[in-house]
Structure formats: C-alpha cells, structure tokens
Image (spheres, rainbow, N blue to C red):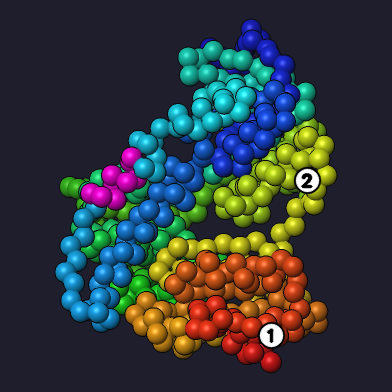
Amino acid sequence: MLWGMSDATEATVDLVLIGAGPGGEALATGAAKAGLRVVVVDRHLVGGECPYYGCIPSKMMIRAADALAEARRVSTLAGDAVVTPSWAPVARRLDEEATTGWDDTIAVERLQDAGATVHHGVGRLDGPGRVRVELPDGSEVVHVARRGVVLNPGTRPAELPIDGLAGTPYWTNRDAVRVTSLPASLVVIGGGPIGSEMAQVFARFGVRVTVLEAGPRILGPDEPEASAILEEVFVAEGIRVMTGVDIRSVAHADGSFTVELGDGERLVSDKVLLAAGRTPNLDDLGLETVGLDPSARTLEVDERMRAGERLWAIGDVTGKGAFTHMSMYQSAIALRDITGEEGPPARYHAVPHTTFTDPEVGGVGMTEKQARDAGLRVRTGLAPLEQSSRGFVHGPGARGLIKVVEDADRGVLVGATAMGPAGGEILGFLAVAVHAEVPTQSLRSMIFAYPTFHRAIETALTDLA
C-alpha cells in the first residue's frame, strides 16, 4: 500500500503515543488507568532501548565484569584465588533474565492490561492530533486523538562518516549485548559512557581493547579530574586509550578489521564497536505535517512538555539528557498536563547521571566549566576518595574523588561529581543538595558518618574554603 492512500481506516481515541520507551510506557499506562482511550505505536520493541539494549543488559554485563575484578583483588586482600572468566553465564542472563530473548510480549501485555491498545508498526504524524499507522501487513489506520499526541521516539546508534565503515560488520551497543562468544581483540570507537562501560567489561573478560576518542579525553562531558582517573584505571587494566585521534578509514577482510588513523598507525582487531553518540528518531515522524522541522536534532518543549498544538514530547529527543530517568521525569509532567492535574513544571538544574564503570562516575548539575561559562562566580572543592578513611580501608578499587562546584555569590552547590565505588549511590546526597539548593554552610554543619565513602563530601566542602 502506498503511503498517504485515503482508504485507511479511521478511529477516534483520546491519546496516541508514538514510541514506547520507559517514559512513553509509563505515560500510556497512567493515561489508560485515568480512563483515557490510549493507543501506543512502536516500530520495534515496546519498552525501548533501555530494557533490551541499554540500562538493564549492560548493567548485567558490568556486574559480571566487576565480580571478576573483585575476585582478582583477593590476592591483595585475603589470600589466593584463581579466576577463569566465562561469557556463557552472562549471555544466558542477558537472554533469559534481562530480555526474555529480546521479546516484548511482557511489556505489551502490561500496557494492554492497563487498558491501552498497542500497535507494532510505523506511526507518523498526519496533522495536529492525527497519527497514521503503517502496520506490518501493509494496511494503514489513522487515529484521531481528541487530547493529542505524545512523541517518545528515542534514538538509535549514530553512524559516523568514516571511509569504509558502513560496509563492515561493526558492532553497535545493540550487537554488543547479544554476543554469545567474545573476540580476542576489540577496537571501541568512542570514549563516552557507552564506549567506556563496554571497553572495561570486555577487557575484564580477557579481550584486548583499544579505545579511540576524537576528543581530548574520555568522558568528555564530565569533570576532567574524573576523566583522568578513569583513564589511569583503564591503562592499569590493560586497555589502550587513545585520545585526540583522527580515524581515516575502517576496512574488514578475512574476518578482521583494520582501522587506519590519521598519524598512519593501523590497528588490527577482530571486532569494532561503534559507540560514538546517538541519532534522534525524528526524521521519519511526519513532523512537517505539524509545522516542525524533520531534520532537527531535538524538539523544543515548554515546562509542561508541550511541543505544539495537542502535541507533547518526552525523552531523548527533547535534548534535556539522554537518560531513562529523564524520560520518566518528563512523562509524569506530560501526563499531569494531559489529564489536567496540578504539579510542578520541569526544572533541569539538578539532572543526575552515572557512568557505571569501575569506579563509577556520577555527576549532577553543572561542571566547573559549565558554571564558569554561565557567568557564575565559582568556587570548587576536591577530595580524593582513596585518601579518605574508607578508601584507605577499602584498598584496591578505591580510586575516585568528590568534587563540588559552588555558586559563591549564593552559597549553594550548582554541581557535583562523585566518583568511586558506588559513586552513583553517593551522588544521591549531592543531588539533593543541588536540587534543593541547600546552603553550603548548612551542609558543612552536618554530621557525616565515619568511616564512609560519602564522608569525603565533608572534605570537599571544607576545601571550598
């Protein structure tokens, strides 16, 4: 059937969601339970990237790799241990426990049980409040939404214009979580959160890993002190980290890859993992039918997540942070707006994030550079985690730091970093401080439990003075 044919079946509903990542699924469930007639359209797996290729499977991989690393520390702390890595238990957990064979039946049934209708198909806007759905059998249905449409299309792995790359069987994160056996060597293109997490996982299972980062350091958006520590950890674990690189070409022949760099060096590896950013799924949504630009990288939304007439957007495509927790946060705000409930508008001054390397790198709010670029009068405090009492007791694996960024004129923290064992958990303390704008004077007057990792926050706060 040709797109745009006029004999498509029309159905009037209350709300249509295009894309069902975690935020979209939560919003659809809430709207259906509130009595709205809800239709959800997703062209891939209901639940989105997070449960099938991102958060959940990757953290299972990380958990396994961390167990290997901790076992290798036994000889320093408690005796002798022989560690023999095996990928088989990891692959089984990813298949059976994390993704149920990359099948979304459970997620679909959750939505249906809540009262929503689910289409596996391609949904596109067809004017304000209208969505045209192309179903797998080629038929079409047009949904006319009385309340409107919510866009939650998410992102996909970015493609890089590297000569020769497109014709090779390179991995993205989606391929990496589905492997059942490991290569002997791996080149990771991209030193951001995904690339860094995957590099450490595979290296701890015995893969020879090289990380290529075009920028001056890995984890570029985080504090430079955290990036430097993580690079030191990677090098100590046998990972080669190359920053400021120019990749000229990628070729694949006879079962191996050749990556040619700008300085003439050639890297040969069994596999290449491309982890260099994400592309928003905005190019095939029919945005032009509601006066929006289909070539845009983000959709502008207001504090109620409104993107246009009877149109809301949530998740990665809003440009407020490509995190599952951001999508969930925005979904609750949009749901309130759709159902007419009161509630606070969106604020983004204390957005948290964690990269689940070992050590974990958690950050909230502004970095020092962002605060200075915003024109604030900035003071910073820094405390190396391994110099804390808990770090001393912990021994191997206790690398990390606490860094706090203060708006000196207001006397409140506007950003912070917690890097170390369970850095993402320590971050919760700092996230509350930034979110609630707790005066640093009040934070200094607290009692910090001893000996804990989070006690290093007190040292960092003292360093402000």
- Given residues 434 and 322, the one toward you in this image is 434
User: What residue sits right under mark 1 in the picture?
Assistant: 444
Q: Residue at x 50, y 70 (%)?
A: 423
Q: Which mark is residue 388?
A: none
Q: Is residue 381 above or below residue 174?
A: below
SS of the residue under disc 1: helix
- Looking at the rendered structure, the number of numbered marks drawn on it comes to 2
What amino acid is labelled 2 in the image? Arg
Q: Which residue appears farthest toward the bottom when viewing the image?
A: 465
Q: Quadrant of residue 307?
A: top right
Where residue 265 sits: x, y (%)?
Answer: 29, 68
Q: Residue at x 56, y 20 (%)?
A: 134
Q: Is residue 228 visible?
A: no
Closer to the camera, 54 or 453? 453
Quadrant in which the C terminus is drawn = bottom right
- Magenta segment: does it hold 87? no
Residue 415, position as x, y percentages in the image: 66, 72
Q: Image point 75% across, 29% down: which residue?
A: 148
Q: Is residue 421 left or right of residue 298?
A: left
Kindly identify which numbered label has been placed on residue 304.
Answer: 2
**Which residues make up the magenta segment?**
88-96
Callout 2 secondary element? loop
Q: Residue 260: x percent and y percent?
A: 31, 61
